Image: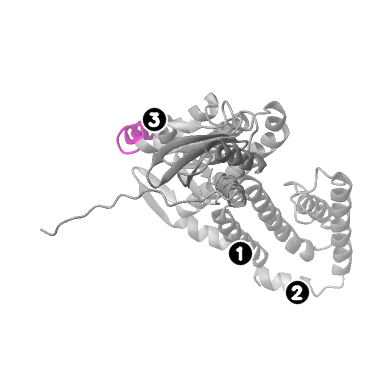
């Protein structure tokens, strides 16, 4: 009789009623303790408590501990098939909740993180089924017999799987620790958003490296062999990854020097917009029309970048008007300056100026210069309001608008 047949036979025993009652009590105790610990508003939405308590890590972890303790007690009196089934299910649930909540906290908008979460869920439930049916042991024995040579070392498939699972678990814990430290420590230690960003990135990289080395060391890998890999990686960076390395280094330099900060309004390579995020490799700049540019960090250090937010948030704008030769210059200047002052976001100090820029047979050209308060609110919108106000004022005063001079070029056919 195999393990699955024994399990099905034990489930027909009337003694399972005590197990079911005990399992229900363990779940109730786990939920009650999770509710008591997570009553604070700040706890909700965290990795431990989730949004509804049951979707966090704490509830299945407590249920697993209580169920395991109950199994140890009942095993002295009877067989416990229900609890043997419940334990791998709860273990899989803890693993799924841990990875799902950590990835959601560290990579909230990443589609790859959602795909990885689904893959881990399927693998966890598959392992639970293998454990319940008793096929886990024979499968691992078969995988342990499948071996291959890597240099002079013989490695089994089961050992490779252990390395993958252990490293993945350690990396998830490192990400959890970095997210917790960023939320609890860095948000209070650094008021500047840019400094908080560079500290979070540096801490996350450091924890991931330490976690990877710890996982490899615990599985018996000789870490001295990584020195050869480090040398090869250095050569690769020196030749093939120059641009990539330059962008990463430039990202940390920008964050440390704070020459650009999240929220600044900049003009770079002919593109204007607000800096929405500074990654380690690139910077996101969003224009007022909603379009977003991905600017490599190296470009921000090696080329000219106009930061309109460093000294002043004011910007000079110019609107051009052509009127007839018989127009009163003083009156036109007064109408244009008053029209500019009537528009929203136009500053009164320094005052708008209407300058006579050109006298031509076709008419008079006036340049209306004015300063706007915040270019982020929309340069095009402010210019449109000034143009509308000036057009209405000129028409109401009877000032004739004329066409601007145009240059006509005649080309003789060859």
Is 123 displayed left or right of 405 in the figure? Answer: right
Name the foreground residue: 184 vs 53: 184
**Residue 201: percent from left, percent from top:** 56, 35
Residue 16 at x, y percent in the picture: 84, 68
The residue that disc 1 covers is 126
Kindly state the secondary structure of the residue where label 2 is placed. helix
- Is 279 rendered above or below residue 142? above
Magenta span has 229? yes
On the image, the x and y values in percent for residue 43 come to 80, 44
Q: Quadrant of residue 314?
A: top right
Comparing 400 with 76, the one in front is 400
Which secondary structure dominates the residues rendered in magenta? helix
Q: Is residue 13 above or below residue 114?
A: below
Q: Nearer the viewer, mark 3 or mark 1?
A: 3
Q: Which residue is mark 2?
A: 9
Magenta segment range? 228-242
Residue at (88% x, 69% y) in the render: 17
Q: Nearer the viewer, mark 2 or mark 3?
A: 3
The residue at which mark 3 appears reads as 302
Is residue 360 rendered to the left or right of residue 278? Answer: left
Between the residue at mark 3 and the residue at mark 1, the CA separation in whole angstroms equals 52 Å
Q: Earlier in the sequence, mark 3 or mark 1?
A: 1
Q: Residue at x 87, y 62 (%)?
A: 24
């Amino acid at each position: 009789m195999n393990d699955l047949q024994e399990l099905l036979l034990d489930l027909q025993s009337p003694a399972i009623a005590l197990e079911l009652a005990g399992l229900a009590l363990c779940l109730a105790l786990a939920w009650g303790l999770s509710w008591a610990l997570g009553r604070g508003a700040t706890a909700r939405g965290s990795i431990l408590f989730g949004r509804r308590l049951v979707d966090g890590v704490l509830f299945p972890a407590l249920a697993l501990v209580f169920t395991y303790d109950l199994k140890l007690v009942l095993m002295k009196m009877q067989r416990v098939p229900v609890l043997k089934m419940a334990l791998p299910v709860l273990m899989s649930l803890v693993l799924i909740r841990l990875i799902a909540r950590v990835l959601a906290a560290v990579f909230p908008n990443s589609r790859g993180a959602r795909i990885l979460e689904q893959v881990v869920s399927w693998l966890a439930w598959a392992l639970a089924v293998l454990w319940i049916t008793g096929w886990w042991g024979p499968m691992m024995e078969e995988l342990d017999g499948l071996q291959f040579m890597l240099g002079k070392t013989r490695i089994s498939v089961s050992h490779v799987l252990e390395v993958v699972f252990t490293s993945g678990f350690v990396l998830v814990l490192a990400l959890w620790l970095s997210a917790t430290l960023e939320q609890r420590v860095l948000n209070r230690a650094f008021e500047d958003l840019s400094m908080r960003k560079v500290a979070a990135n540096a801490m996350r990289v450091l924890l991931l490296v330490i976690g990877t080395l710890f996982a490899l060391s615990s599985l018996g890998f000789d870490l001295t062999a990584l020195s050869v890999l480090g040398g090869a990686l250095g050569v690769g960076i020196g030749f093939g990854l120059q641009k990539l390395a330059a962008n990463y280094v430039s990202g940390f330099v920008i964050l440390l020097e704070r020459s650009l900060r999240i929220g600044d309004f900049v003009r770079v390579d002919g593109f204007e917009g607000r800096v929405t995020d500074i990654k380690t490799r690139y910077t996101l700049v969003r224009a007022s029309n909603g379009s977003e540019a991905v600017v490599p960090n190296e470009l921000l250090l090696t080329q000219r970048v106009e930061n309109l937010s460093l000294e002043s948030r004011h910007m000079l704008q110019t609107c051009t008007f052509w009127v007839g030769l018989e127009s009163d210059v003083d009156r036109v200047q007064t109408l244009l300056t008053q029209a500019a002052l009537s528009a929203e976001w136009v500053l009164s100090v320094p005052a708008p100026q209407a300058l006579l820029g050109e006298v031509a047979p076709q008419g008079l050209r006036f340049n209306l210069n004015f300063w706007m308060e915040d270019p982020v609110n929309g340069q095009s919108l402010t210019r449109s309001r000034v143009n509308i106000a000036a057009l209405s004022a000129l028409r109401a005063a009877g000032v004739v608008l004329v066409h601007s001079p145009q240059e006509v070029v005649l080309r003789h056919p060859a």
